[in-house]
Image (cartoon, grey):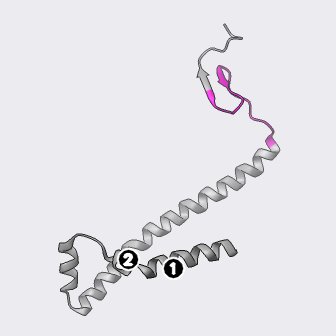
Amino acid sequence: MKRLLKIGAAMAATLAAAPRALAQGCAMCYADAAAQSPRARHQLDLAILTLLVPSVLMFAGVLVAAFRRRERNAAEGEELGPITPAPGISISAKGRRLAAGPSPESV
């Protein structure tokens, strides 16, 4: 929990220290957005947030699914025992696949 808090504080400090970095983009887009009325700028900010929300939710969903799958596989892996390679596949001591094809025993 402390580590997460430290990471969050570091990210917040980085973002607060560089406010101009958040508004980078093409000069024409920036100039056009800066020339808008305050109401139009507010609408542009809402549009950007609207486009940001689905991508953040999809990213979070993939992360949650990956962590759940990792936990499920770790729990199942303890019950299943060692994994043996399929016939015809050689595995090195480090678990890397060396070669595919007929095994020396089958020739």
Please give the label number shown on residue 12.
Answer: 1
Question: Taking 8 as reference, is 79 above or below it?
Answer: above
Amino acid beneath label 2 = Thr
Quarter of the figure with the N terminus: bottom right
At x 65% / y 19%, what residue is drawn?
88
- Mark 2: few/some/many CA within 10 Å (<14, 14-19, 20+): few
Q: CA distance from mark 2 to mark 1?
A: 22 Å
Q: Which mark is residue 50?
A: 2
Q: Residue at the spot x=66%, y=7% of the render?
A: 107
- Residue 73 in picture, x, y percent from top left: 71, 49
- Measured as percent of width and height from the top left, residue 67 is found at 64, 58
Q: Is residue 36 above or below residue 23?
A: below
Q: Secondary structure at mark 1?
A: helix
Foreground: 24 or 83? 24
How many numbered discs, if any? 2
Which stretch is magenta? 80-97
Please state the horizontal and vertical placement of residue 69, each as a whole percent of the image: 65, 54
**Of the residues tagged 2 and 1, which is closer to the observer?**
1
Check if residue 10 falls in the magenta segment: no
Residue type for callout 1: Ala
Q: Main secondary structure of the magenta part?
A: loop
The reply to whether callout 2 and callout 1 are in contact (CB within 8 Å) is no
Q: Could you tell whether 67 is left or right of 24 in the image?
A: right
